[in-house]
Amino acid sequence: MSLERDFPLVPPFEVRAPAQQRIPFVFNSPHSGRYYPESFLQASRLDALAIRYSEDCYVDELFASVPRLGAPLLKAHFPRAFLDVNREPYELDPRMFDEPLPPFVNIQSARVAGGLGTIPRLVGEGQLIYPGRIMLDEAFYRIEQIYKPYHAALEELLRATRQRFSYSVLIDCHSMPGGIRPGEIGSRPDFIIGDRFGRSCSEQLTQAAIELLQQLGYTVAHNKPYAGGFITEHYGRPATGCYALQIEINRSLYMDEQSLQKLPGFEALCSDLYQFVSDLTSLPDDLFSVPPLAAE
């Protein structure tokens, strides 16, 4: 188990950054990775297409223009089915492993119960990834060698941003299935903006993001059914000048969800998102209640 084994050609993740950061925004695409380690594919019971059904396909490409606007973009190359960094570091499912889990592991979360822990058990609509149990050492390797460095990189981007501008805004970029699920009423909106029910971001910034997307002609929901995951919750601390929003994009806008091929409207959506990000990052500073910079 090593990065050389699993990622010999590309790094597990990378930062696409402008020559100089000009705006207090950081963009993050943690679920769009599509480099599947060969050892992982061999261990899975799924074929090369089915294993991708949890992927936030092409979200990194949809936001690829943000460095031109002066903001860094952190993007995963590792796939979500391999490791989910939008979870606590040790949300693990005891049904997955040969050995008993240590007491510090969170085995009680709703995400673990749903098969979507830090090391996922399922992809898509409930398809098992592995034919049997896996070694616990494999999970710890992914967490220590990829999860923790990924979050260290994100924390450093946010720290440097806040030091430079006195506050930081994290935009956590995701996609969602187009079809409704049991318990939902009506069709899925084009976008969902999540702010952990007001805990991760200022009301003014959240509302501005919703209105900017609506002005582009899209339907937008707020927090339902996605209010933000671990990343939004963990990094969004408005009282300290750290704001975080999650944006979910309906995949049916830009891709065929069965074949995973881009639709003709992909480039138009890229253009609209460039306009959205340009307008969002041009909002006046007085939208933010910026506390004095805390000692680093």
Image: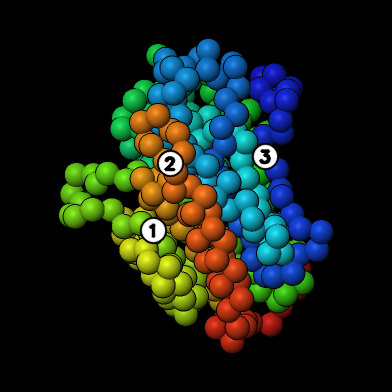
How crowded pointer 1 is (Cα within 10 Å; few <14, some 14-19, many 20+) is rated as: many
Quarter-of-image position of residue 79: top right
The answer to whether residue 211 is seen in the rendering is yes
In the picture, the quarter occupied by the C terminus is bottom right
Residue 226, x across and y down, in percent? 36, 55
- Say which of 186 and 2 sits in front: 186
- Say which of 32 and 44 sits in front: 32
**Which mark identifies residue 191?**
1
Q: Distance between the residues labelled 2 and 3?
A: 26 Å
Q: What residue type is labelled 2?
A: Leu
What residue is shown at x 55% (from left), y 66% (from top)?
A: 275
| Location of residue 85 with respect to 6 vertically, above or below | below
**Secondary structure under the numbered disc 1 in the rendered image:** strand
Q: In the rendered image, which residue does mark 3 sit on?
A: 13
Nearer the camera: disc 2 or disc 1: 2
**Secondary structure under the numbered disc 2 in the rendered image:** loop
Q: How far apart are marks 2 and 1 (CA)?
A: 17 Å
The answer to whether residue 243 is seen in the rendering is no
| Location of residue 252 with respect to 44 vertically, above or below | below
Nearer the camera: disc 3 or disc 1: 1
What residue is shown at x 62% (from left), y 51% (from top)?
A: 64
**Secondary structure under the numbered disc 3 in the rendered image:** strand
| Location of residue 93 with respect to 32 vertically, above or below | above
What residue is shown at x 51% (from left), y 36% (from top)?
A: 80
Q: In the rendered image, which residue does mark 2 sit on?
A: 263
